[in-house]
């Protein structure tokens, strides 16, 4: 019995050892496969940070990018801050990407200060415009007509944050056109709340507006003509810190293809605006448009 017990014990030890060796070999194989997958992906890092302003299109671009990248194995942090700190952070290498840089005009001052330390990767939207916007029911069509109706508009142009390029250009428009108006500095959401309130009552209002923005899908609006050319045409550029391409060659190719048409972007912005959770709304939109988003990846990722 003692001899049999010893054999049994030895058999058990041998079995345990065999199982352990098999598990180790299997784990090594899995890790090897994961390593091959990472090598095939080509990116040296998997974690990145995207900065964005509280502008409707910037929120949309950024959340779409986050869910698409996370679906492909990346760890993505998104941080909302003002445009000035965004450019400064990227220039210092403290973050990786900004998907809503209005170039070459609206953010010209930022680019002159930080551009030599940044890289333009692509264009998230290629038809950016800015200007003074009124509802279609307002019976003026040009910035030059505003002084004839100061009382009607309360002498106010409803604007957004002072760090935005459109805020600077509106101050320039007030000067160049000799407008008897002041620009009310607020935020994108606050400006939209003022527009909605006035629109629902069919009251006159003039706001600083831009395309792309869901306001154009939700309301019947028009730009006031700008004969002095204060408000330029831009693209919504994707800019990165220096060294981004070296660290993320696959993502650099992805973002060079990342581009939305106006109808697609309004659909995305509308979904995010109507959803209680911005990321959840972006995820649902991504699922419905996955074929398009997947086409932005290089063939080997």
Image (tube, rainbow, N blue to C red):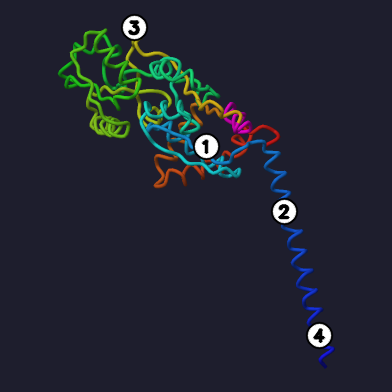
Q: Nearer the viewer, mark 2 or mark 4?
A: 4
Mark 2 or mark 4: whose residue is earlier in sequence: 4
Q: Are marks 3 and 2 in contact (CB under 8 Å)?
A: no
Q: Does residue 142 appear to the left or right of 36 in the view shown?
A: left
- State the residue position of label 1: 65
Q: Residues within 10 Å of mark 1 (few under 14, many from 20)?
A: many
Between circles 1 and 3, the one closer to the viewer is: 1
Between tags 3 and 2, which lies in front? 2
Badge 2 is on which residue?
30
Residue 227's tag is: 3
Q: Position of residue 9 (x, y in %)?
A: 78, 82
Q: Is residue 27 above or below residue 189?
A: below
Give the extent of the magenta segment. Answer: 247-257
Question: What is the CA distance from the residue labelled 2 to the residue labelled 4?
Answer: 36 Å
* Between discs 1 and 2, the one toward the N terminus: 2
- Residue position marked by numbered label 4 in the rendering: 6
Whether residue 255 is in magenta: the answer is yes
């Amino acid at each position: 019995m003692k001899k049999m017990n010893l054999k049994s014990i030895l058999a058990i030890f041998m079995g345990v050892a065999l199982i352990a060796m098999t598990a180790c070999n299997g784990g090594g194989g899995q890790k090897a496969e994961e390593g091959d997958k990472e090598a095939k992906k080509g990116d040296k890092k998997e974690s990145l940070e995207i900065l964005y302003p509280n502008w409707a299109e910037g929120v949309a671009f950024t959340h779409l990018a986050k869910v698409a990248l996370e679906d492909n194995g990346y760890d993505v942090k998104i941080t909302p801050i003002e445009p000035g700190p965004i450019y400064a952070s990227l220039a210092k290498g403290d973050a990786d990407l900004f998907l809503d840089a209005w170039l070459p005009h609206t953010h010209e001052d930022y680019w002159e200060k930080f551009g030599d330390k940044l890289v333009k990767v692509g264009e998230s939207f290629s038809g950016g415009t800015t200007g003074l916007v009124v509802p279609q029911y307002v019976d003026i069509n040009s910035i030059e007509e505003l002084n004839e109706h100061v009382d009607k508009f309360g002498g106010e142009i409803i604007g957004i944050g002072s760090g935005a390029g459109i805020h600077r250009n509106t101050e320039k428009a007030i000067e160049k056109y000799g407008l008897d108006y002041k620009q009310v500095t607020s935020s994108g959401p606050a400006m939209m709340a003022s527009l909605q309130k006035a629109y629902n009552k069919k009251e006159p209002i003039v706001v600083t507006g831009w395309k792309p923005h869901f306001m154009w899908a939700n309301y019947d609006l028009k730009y006031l003509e700008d004969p002095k050319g204060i408000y330029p045409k831009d693209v919504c550029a994707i800019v990165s810190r220096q060294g981004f391409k070296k660290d993320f060659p696959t993502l650099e190719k992805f973002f060079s293809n990342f581009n939305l048409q106006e109808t697609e972007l309004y659909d995305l912005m509308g979904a995010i605006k109507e959803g209680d959770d911005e990321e959840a709304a972006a995820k649902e939109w991504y699922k419905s448009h996955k074929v398009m988003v997947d086409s932005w990846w290089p063939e080997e990722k």
